Amino acid sequence: MSESHAKLGFLRSYVFSTDHKVIGIQYGITALLFLFFGLCLMMMMRWQLAYPGEAIPIIGGLLGETLVDDGAMLPSFYNSLGAMHGTIMVFMGIVPLAVGAFGNYIVPLQIGAPDMAFPRLNMASYQAFVIGGLVMLSSFFLPGGAASSGWTSYAPLSVTATTGQTFWLIGMIFLIASSLLGAINFIVTIIHLRAEGLTFFRLPFFIWSQLVTAFLLLLAFPPLQVAAIFQLMDRLADTSFFMPTGLVSGGDPVAAVGGGSPLLWQHLFWFLAHPEVYVLILPGMGIVAEVIANNSRKPLWGYRPMVYSLLFLGFMSFCVWAHHMYMTGMGTTMSTFFQITTMIISIPSVIILTCLVISLWGASIRFPVPMLFALAFLPMFGIGGLTGLPLGLAAPDAHFHDTYYVIGHFHYVVAPGTIFAMFAGIYHWYPKVTGRQMNVPLGKLHFWLSFVFMNGIFMPMMFEGMAGVSRRLFDPTVYEIGAAVHGLTTMSSWSAWLLALSQIPFIINFFMSMRKKERAEENPWQATTLEWATSTPPPHGNFVEPPVVYSGPYEYSVPGASSDFSPQFIKQES
Amino acid sequence: MSEIVIPYRTEPHPLTGVTSGKLGIWLFLASEVMLFGALFSSYVLLRVGAAEGTWPTGVEAGLNVPIGTFNTLVLITSSITMVMSWASLKMGNPGAFKRYMGATIALGMLFLVVKGFEYSGKFHHGIFPATGWPGASDPSTFYGFYFTITGLHALHVFLGILVNIWLLVWGLALYKTEPERFAGRVEISGLYWHFVDLVWIFLFPLLYLL
């Protein structure tokens, strides 16, 4: 099989490939670039917040005069940066990395499949993602700049915004199409292409997390598609789905037909965007579960309760969306319902996290770099989750809503949470993809610096939020409360820039390790799951002989076994 | 492309009882249910929220029920011919497949042509998506919904026609080597076509009759 692979031209092998491994790498590289770009946008915002009105150093002079005035950021540009930072990080960074990259590369290997069920569909979904990403990026060059109505694009503000918003909507439609195609592919692959003997309850937890994630993408994204189409119609065909009768903007009546409802946008948007939160976190949990089981050399504690929790979590995530909307005046009856569902959905998350913590109990833990990131994930996600509880109740939300507390809360879930899980995954599977191990001292440096600065960014935000600083302010010091906590803002900003610098060891490590002469072992982590049953890196078609599975995914330290790990694909003498 | 054999392309999987392609199209249709579900829910939300007397019935707004009924019949007939084309393949009669598939495509096009006449009639009378219903004191989004939902549905019909044309003209070559796989493709296209038909069955009363 590998011989015929060599015959393919460069384009077919690396650009228009249908091999899930190549597509996974494409997704991974693209998503990492987008993550880096999103980080850069954020660093510019942090300058304005820490030093309002001062010229941005170095790049301030390079930006056009529609963006900056004498090097100092203009408010409209700040709004664009905020909206695009959110959009890029969520839809073009984390999801493609967690689902597109790790899902594509690891899922077929871990279930013993030769490829995804629909290889060409897989390629199409990557291409749709790239087109959507390019449309989003190109919007920065429009007159009026990129979308500037927040990543949530609330109407009617977004309907009356500049052309960047139209590009945002078109880009979203492509990104949604990409996710839908991907989701179908993942579900069919996981259900149909499992190796012989790999029953559902022998699936690694990572596979379960990808399966539930795919269902969330499949069912939650179409309503956002509808919302995007409605908003496009509102913007381009002057309909008024989201434009209420008698709307006045800046003292002037808006020339819209009226009859629409701005709340309709919020309902449609959050019907997607709440399940999307779980799309962001579940693959991360899956990766962390793999890394923890492998490095604690013990089976996961409570594998089945974890799987049931995951399924329940997936279902419940469709029933909590309006907890983002307590302040809209939708009424106490609605608020009561969504408070109850929100409290219920916290239970399965806690079960999963608790199981992961108990898995460490009594284990002789190894501490390679991926394990450091996985262990850091637990308290970071814990902080993110627990700070969410006050937001899930309408009364405290009245105080916290739209403050930096919210920003701190969800960044704790997504940044030191999911992104740490992604780093754990990269360090863990790097030898599988490249056949080389990453450098350990550089990895540890990367971890400790990232860990310190991540907390340095987001912990101050919690206190700023509790003081009452609004999240959307261009210059928080114009208000007394903002000026009073300005020291915290500055600390956040410096941590952000230092966090960016702390990624340098990672970038060096990522590229230099590829060129190492010394090859990694075939199964460097002594892991039990199927991706290690084939050679490293795997050939085209993945497995020379279709693997057969004899046991569960985490048979570590089995009493009486010859070694402390008993791979799924090797029959144990009993 | 080197040949990797991906199983369950033509033979059903023992667990689900269907091929991968068929499972895939059912999942796709599930997402389509969510798409049109969101469209219908939005319609309900805005209609229920509209002030008394501001939301017209289809007839009040000037939609033509006989034309809508005719188009409904056209689509239902096309669903029947779609099934017949698949059944002809299963009975080993590619000639009949061609005739029925041709009829399905023609009926789909007829639907779009009729829809086009309806649209141009509306435009001719100065009715556009942004037009509120002129009979009411407060504007409504009735025509916004009418054009958006029927437009999206027409897009679905159009894509279905494209797939069917591909199956009839280029896809048929596969029948000579792998008849089962080709019949599977026709069945998948058929499931999609029936779904699009079903959406219209809900759309027609929602917009024209209620």
Image (cartoon, rainbow, N blue to C red):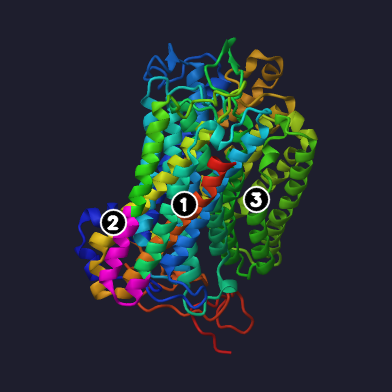
Earlier-in-chain disc, 3 versus 1: 1
Image location of residue A90, percent across then percent down? 52, 41
Q: Give amino acid for label 3.
A: Ser
Q: Secondary structure at mark 3?
A: loop
Q: Find out whether the residues at labels 3 and 1 contact each other: C-beta distance under 8 Å.
A: no
Q: Nearer the viewer, mark 2 or mark 3?
A: 2
* Same subunit: marks 2 and 1: no
User: Residue B165: which disc?
Assistant: 2
Give the number of the disc on residue A180. 1
Whether residue A453 appears in this view of the structure is yes
Residue count near mark 2 (Cα–Cα under 10 Å), binned few <14, some 14–19, many ≥20: some
- Per the rendered image, the range of residues in magenta is B87-106
In this view, A336 is above or below A574:
above
Query: The N terminus of chain A is located in which quarter?
Result: bottom left
Q: Which residue is mark 3?
A: A317
Q: Tell me which corner region of the image, top left, top right, bottom left or bottom right, holds residue B56.
A: top right
Which residue shows up at 60% across the image and 26% down it?
Answer: A259
Amino acid type, mark 1: Leu
Nearer to me, A153 or A9: A153
Mark 1 burial class by Cα count in 10 Å: few <14, some 14-19, many 20+: many
